[in-house]
Image (cartoon, rainbow, N blue to C red):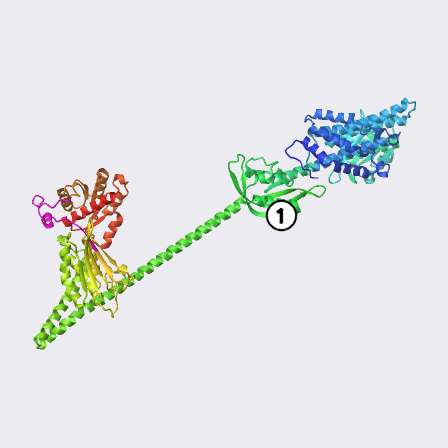
Amino acid sequence: MIVPLDPGSSPTRRLAAFLHAERDVLLAAWTQRVVDAAGAPEAKGQGGPALGGRIGGLLDQLRGALEGCPEDEEEAARRGRQIARVSNVERGDVERGERVGAGGEGLAAALREIGHLRAILCGGCARGGIPLEGGGGALVHAALDELAVVLGEQAGSALAAAEGEGVRLSEEVKATRDRFALLAKVSVVMGDSLDYESRLQALSRLIVPAFADASAVSILDEEGRIQRLTDAATDGQGAAVRRARRMPVPVGLLPIIEDTLRTGRVRYFADYDREVLAGLPADDPYVVATREVGVKAILFAPLCVRDRQLGYLTAAMSTSGRDYSPEDVVFLEAIAERAALAIDNARLFREAERQRLRLAQVFEQAPVAIAMLRGPDHVYELANPLVASPFQGLDLIGKTVGQIVQGSAVQGVVEDLDQVYRTGEPLSRTEIHLDLPVRDGSTRATVYADLVCQPMRNEAGEIDGIIAVFIDVTERVLARSRSEALAEEHLREQQQHEAERNLLLARAEQARAAAEEASELKDQFLATVSHELRTPLNAILGWTRILRTTRLPAERQERALETVERNARAQTQLIEDLLDISRVVSGKLRLEASPLDLGTVVEAVLETVRPAAEAKQITLTPSLGSGATVILGDPARLQQVIWNLLSNAIKFTAQRGHVEVRIGRDEAFAAVEVKDDGRGISPEFLPHVFERFRQAEGSTTRAHGGLGLGLAIVKSLVELHGGTIQALSEGEGQGSTFVVRLPFVKARQAEAEALAGLPASAAPDVERPPALHGKSVVVVDDEADAREVLVEILERCGARVVAAGSAAEAFAAVERTRPDLLVADIAMPGEDGYMLIRKVRALPPEDGGLTLAVALTAYTRREDEARALRAGFDMHVPKPVDPIAFLDVLESLLRRGHAVEG
């Protein structure tokens, strides 16, 4: 029996709701119980239940009284008794003569029916999990008990009225009245409590002495063994009766007891000693104790309910000399019936209570979350602790699932519940993502759960709720997510390692290819050197042998000598190129710098290459501008640069082509631009045009000779002058342009050698660059001589110089003075120049982190320069340093730094 009750309400209110919801069910069950009762007159077609259809009104009265019932049990019992006293529901039934009569069959039937009603109520409450206790239980029991008393009183009043009308009542009728009064008391006692052991003891005391001199109740345990439970006796007989009760039942007595229980009828022995005890061993403890009591007549009444054997009740006459009539036998049957009902109800309630507690224990301690949802809105009616635990104490009862569970899956959960409620089919879902609120509502807990839904049906078979089981799989889902994340991370690491491995392999392959290419280039270069050296030697040796062995005409002899001279000069140029590139690689190439006019250098080179241009009918177009373009440089090396560029332009320009040379200027640099409309440079070769040993034509079928060193030497010479060179071409057949940029410098008043080679007092003054005047400069070099000459040069130019012998001293000076310029050696003990500049660059700008810095070093390779610039230096100046060139570099750097600041 499932009733939609609020588990949070009091037991009394739940009992009232139970009576309201189950009224018709209880009434039908009571009617069926009355009709099915074995031996009852109602079961023999004698007009139906004595109380008829009046029980429904009684249930309504009880329900109404329970709605306002106090929890105080005494007050509740008073109200229950009042209901029985003021009610006339049963009075007509009892007072109908045809039902009461002299034998009192109507009263007996009414009392049995009240007992049936009590059993139905107790059983229904037990199955519904409603304890029939507290104020509500006291009210119901008191009403039923008092009703039995009222029925007995009504029967007595009817008999008294009959006597008052002149009807002389016989002793038999008076005895019947006394039995009715006793039966009413028995009904009260047996309905007073569910503790049937104490109620049976009270029953025994009621029977003695009104109905017997001694009485006892024995019940059967779960194994069918007899247990003598209670006893009572008249004064002086108690001790003997108790001794008899403690004695084991003789084997010879068992057939009588078994027959009594099997037939369900009372067994009567008028002379118990002669009829029964005489057939048992005289020394049997039970026989001895029973004879001590002096039992004469005895009744064995079975305690049976619905074909279930519960035990038996004995009533015996001894010292009083009384005997039992057939009416007494019927009366004891009625008493036994009420006792059996009380035992059965108590046992049913205890069993139901045990089951309820067991189910409640299972419900509370279940390893999964279980909730009972009522109605189509899925309202929480019951929830075990695992349901409530994620909500941190939030009260769920009375709220709908939609109010509690939120998140992306809530609509799906509600739809699933609706489907179960609508179709009556179970349903399950796995790993639902739910967001659950906590008590303060400020945060939500994320939970993953498997859901199992089972419909619940009422007595009519209609679905009125759902049992929802939530299995928390959050840890499983999170563990899997963590595992998947770890797997993904592991995969990413593997992919990263694979990518790094592939990158390393690619770099190794590139390095191998580069090494192979370099080796191939060197092989090609050696082959080219061999070819370029042997070719002029072939001409020289050939004509020399001819001249020694043959007398030639004057014209032929002159031509032979010119050929020898031309090839000797070509071989000399080849050797010079090889020596130059060797000096560049070893860092031994030196400039003899002096102020010069760049235009004059270009004009001199133009005159040199003009014959070659004219031989190919190539137009040379100079655009040198007006006025002198003074720079500091080595005239011979600059001529070598310009000559190489112009020679290449003429070499790679077709007949009747055009070559242009132009000098340009900007604020800080002079530019020489050589442009031709010759064969151009392919995009693939353009990035490598200044590399050593590189030639666009590398095969034996190339159209032009040379070692492929010219442009590499040109770039090195330009960079030694502090300048840059750039090659431009739109592709093969589109011509090419080379642009050389050289820094401007003002003419010095004395030569650098005089300043560097004489004592400070004897050294002539140099022009003091205004950019250095008043500037703060930190100079660091571990060699004292080198440090002193730099200090002397800078101080003569008006700079404020701080000298340092180590990187640590220099860094402290930078932090202390925040200089405009730092000049640092690279190779120093302890910390070198690279470490020093990194520490300086790590300083904030306001603490000197942006100080202009020049690396002054004997490491002069291109990679050394690149390393210095990467480390943080602004300029790289190789040793030995030319004072004038050094000052010019510093001035250029300071101007550039000011331009950036501006």
- In depth, the one of 636 and 362 nearer the eye is 636
- On screen, residue 669 versus residue 275, left or right, reads left
Category of crowding for the residue at label 1, using alpha-carbon neighbours closer than 10 angstroms: few (below 14), some (14–19), many (at least 20): some
The magenta segment is: 740-769
- Vertical order, 2 against 234 (above or below): below
Which residue extends farthest bottom? 550
The residue closer to the viewer here, 308 or 42, is 42
**Quadrant location, the N terminus:** top right
**Whole-percent x, y for residue 593 in the image:** 14, 53
Q: Main secondary structure of the magenta part?
A: loop
Residue type pointed to by label 1: Leu
Assess whether residue 753 is covered by the magenta stretch: yes
For image coordinates 91% across by 23% down, the residue present is 165
Residue identified by numbered label 1:
427
Q: In front here: 461 or 490?
A: 461
Front-most of residues 726 and 210 = 726
When the figure is inspected, residue 299 is found, relative to residue 771, above or below; the finding is above
Q: Is residue 103 above or below residue 518?
A: above
* 274 horizontally vs 752: left or right: right
Residue 210 can be seen, yes or no? no
Q: Is residue 745 magenta?
A: yes
